[in-house]
Image: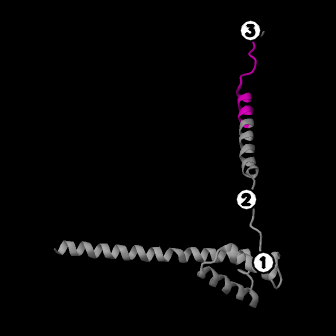
Amino acid sequence: MERKAAGAGRAMIAWILTAALAAAAPAGDAKARMEQLERSLLAPCCYKEPISRHHSDVSTKMKLEVARWVAEGKSDEEILAVYRERYGARVVIPPEPDPSPWIRGIPWAAALAGGALVLRILFKWRKPGPRTSGSEA
């Protein structure tokens, strides 16, 4: 009887811990979303810095609004659309495009070509020269 009660108690604790961890996970995700959104919006007072780094009343207000809207469950596109409408398209920093595959591949191709050239030179130097006959007088 005691074993069943202990097993049920452990199961309850495991279930509570699992629920607590599941509830804590969206908080980290929400914080990451807020940081990404703050890096995606320029301060409308000068259009020079993202609101994540800018220290003005407008950027502070925008940070608070972003936090509130993320907590309410609005999507990133909905939040960015509000600021586009309010301040114009200039306030949204366009995302950086992925680098071209050529940019990633060219250094590897150059390294392979350079290695092949080095091997060719080494094998060429290693070849024995023409042999002369042993009867030179």
Q: Give the range drawn in magenta.
A: 118-134
Tell me the amino acid under the disc marked 3: Ser
Q: Residue 125 carries which label?
A: none
Image quadrant where one finds the N terminus: bottom left
Amino acid type at circle 1 is Arg
Question: What label sits on residue 135 in the rendered view?
Answer: 3
Q: Residue 12 appears at what percent x and percent y? A: 32, 76
Q: Which of 118 and 63 is in front in this view?
A: 63
Task: Answer with mark 2 or mark 3, whichever residue precedes in sequence.
Answer: 2
Tell me residue 132's x, y (percent). 75, 14
Q: Residues within 10 Å of mark 1 (few under 14, many from 20)?
A: some
Q: Does the magenta stretch include residue 131?
A: yes
Q: Mark 2 points at which residue?
A: 98
Residue 72 locus on image (x, y percent): 60, 82
Instruction: Give the distance between the C-alpha atoms of the residues marked 2 and 3, in whole angstroms.
Output: 70 Å
Q: Is 22 displayed left or right of 42 in the figure?
A: left
At horizontal 47% and vertical 77% (from top left) the residue drawn is 23
Q: Which residue lies furthest to the left in this view?
A: 1
Can residue 72 be seen at all in this image of the molecule? Answer: yes
Circles 2 and 1 in contact, beta carbons < 8 Å: no
Can you say whether 105 is above or below 3 in the image?
A: above
Callout 2 amino acid = Asp
Tell me the distance, in whole angstroms, between the alpha carbons under discs 2 and 1: 24 Å
Residue that lies at the very extreme toward the bottom in this rendered image: 57
Q: Which of marks 3 and 1 is nearer the N terminus?
A: 1
Query: In terms of sequence position, does the residue under pointer 2 or pointer 1 come before the other?
Result: 1
Question: What is the x, y in percent for residue 30?
Answer: 59, 76
Residue 56 visible? The answer is: no
Horizontally, is 29 left or right of 60 in the view?
A: left
Where is residue 31, by image quadrant? bottom right
- Mark 1 sits on what residue? 84
**Local secondary structure at mark 2:** loop
